[in-house]
Image: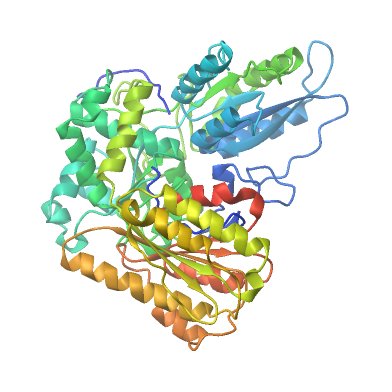
Amino acid sequence: MGMYTEGQNRWIGVVIVVAAALLFGVIICVSVVFSGALCPYININCGGGATASGTATPAAPAGAVEITFYSSNAKEDWVNAVTEKFNAAGIKTAGGKPVFVRVTHVTSGGSQTDILSGKIQPTVWSPGDQGWIDETNQIWRDRTGRPLVPDACQPTVYAPIGFGMWRPFAEALGWPDKPISWDTIVDLAADPQGWAKYGHPEWGEFKFGHTHPDYSNSGLLIMTALAYDTLGRTSGLTPEAVKSEAVVEAFRNVEFHTYHYGVQNRDLITLMARRGPSYLHAINSSEAEILKANAERAGELRFPLVFIFPAKGTFWTEQPYCVVDADWVTDEQKEAARLYRDFILAREQQELAVDNYLRPVDPSIPLRAPLTLEGGTDPRVTLAQVPALASPSGDATAAVKDVFKQTKKKATILLVVDTSGSMQGDKIANAVEATANFIRRLERDDEVFVMPFSDGVNELQPAGRAGDVAETLGDRVRSLYAEGGTALYDAVCAAAERVEAMRLEDVAANEKRLYGIVVLSDGQDTASTRTENDLFGCLPSGEDVEGIKVFTIAYGDDADKDLLLRVANRTNGKTFTGDPATIERVYTAISAEQ
């Protein structure tokens, strides 16, 4: 590993949609098809008295100085553990008041958006990387004349970003003794023989999944690392360099073999566990998520996963602790925030980070289990071996997203909208307006189709390339009204058959796209000629990574939630339940998945 050099870490933080239906009134406590709930990671409260982390918070003691801590979900388990200890310790301010910390776990990008829109008012903000702070400070300065976070942020722990891969596949590439870089992955993706060059023709072409750069800190960082790697740099990333032919080609090779996106790595890991090594070979991930999966989900995984450091450099994500300076933060809260900061940086809490699959910022603390080769990572790797990539400018970050949009496979989306009699009133009005608005926001080269259904199933015209039909199709959607029964089974089968026919045409033309169906329904089936068994016979098996994914939205209390969940689960989609107050979150959630 002597080939690496040392660097320093920081960074800044497409909706290429694959599907979405919906409604101005439909969504979200995400009832995820997979084991983890999505709502916490896009800042949605799923009810039940829980924070966005999904964990109930005890009441603060009388007279306490409360601080709100919005923390990136990469360090969720550690932050929960140290916060519980802190709140139980009875630490007081100089004025004798107890300090109480209330934690919410968020995504970096989602929390940034909510801070800037005024939806949340943190005392302390800890996104995944310093770049999110730098970008937010610039926007805040433009608005108010001062930064949101004027003082230097303190790193809390390291959660390096890299690749998660099945152990046999990683070992075929030479892990852990041979450095594996983005170059290795790009070359593998570009080779039509795939894994044959590594002695495993039976594994076929490379299959990758990564979280969406618009919604995920690790997704944005891993694609920025790809740009750095292609250019042979660890700093000095410029928009012009990002948009160079070499970088665009590298992105294109990776995206051509990318079959799943998402908001968080945990869903991708769950998908790998559910479908096995034939479905996805590797994903982007933090080191912590891979180690946690091996430790807690060993019985579900066909093989163990390993974490691979991109050899030419990566983002070590220092998880900065940043005290906010805004009108809603008092001097007393700032004092309390400093007390909490000192507590989590103390050696005892830093040692606890290792137990939670994170690397302490205190270099004197030795790494131990679970950060071991047996656990799924190489503890020998340090900043001295794998350099930390420098934070690019906001313009360079925008260029990374532009190149991602340019090279990402386009989507074919079919929206199935319930217009039965039970949808009368605000239900149908909100549904059609939101559906039309969503269609207008699609990427121009996405394809969009709409099938309303009640007693029967129809397809609206025009349909096709969003850039050509969005305005007219949106007007047609607005003209829909509610009447009749609910032919849900027939509608889903018709949609699956329609999209499968288009998929086969694309295959014949050697065109690769992503295929998604979004089904919105508020009730049980009452009018289909097909049975429930027929419905499941119409669905793709979910075994083919290039197959159709169905996303379902259960709109209201009378929806067939179990059926919709099973449909989504069968096809590697997701299911959502509806609430008019959180419509934009559903768009975000579904848009990020493909």
- Residue at 37% from the left image edge and 69% from the top image edge: 542
Q: Is residue 579 visible?
A: yes
Quadrant assignment, res 91: top right
- Residue at 73% from the left image edge and 52% from the top image edge: 48
Q: Is residue 539 visible?
A: no
Q: Position of residue 323 (x, y in %)?
A: 62, 18
Q: Is residue 488 left or right of residue 471?
A: right
Q: Position of residue 574 (x, y in %)?
A: 49, 60
Q: Looking at the image, which residue sits at the far right?
A: 62
- Residue at 36% from the left image edge and 46% from the top image edge: 210
- Residue at 43% from the left image edge and 47% from the top image edge: 441
Q: Is residue 524 left or right of residue 272?
A: right
Q: Position of residue 264 (x, y in %)?
A: 47, 45
Number of labelled discs? Answer: 0
Quadrant of image for the N terminus: top left
Q: Is residue 478 above or below residue 455?
A: above
Taking depth in this image into account, of 81 and 408 the one nearest to the observer is 408
Q: Position of residue 344 (x, y in %)?
A: 62, 24
Q: Is residue 19 left or right of residue 111?
A: left
Taking depth in this image into account, of 195 and 252 the one nearest to the observer is 252
Quadrant assignment, res 248: top left
Taking depth in this image into account, of 340 and 31 the one nearest to the observer is 31
Q: Is residue 263 left or right of residue 115?
A: left
Colour option used: rainbow
Q: Is residue 455 above or below residue 193?
A: below
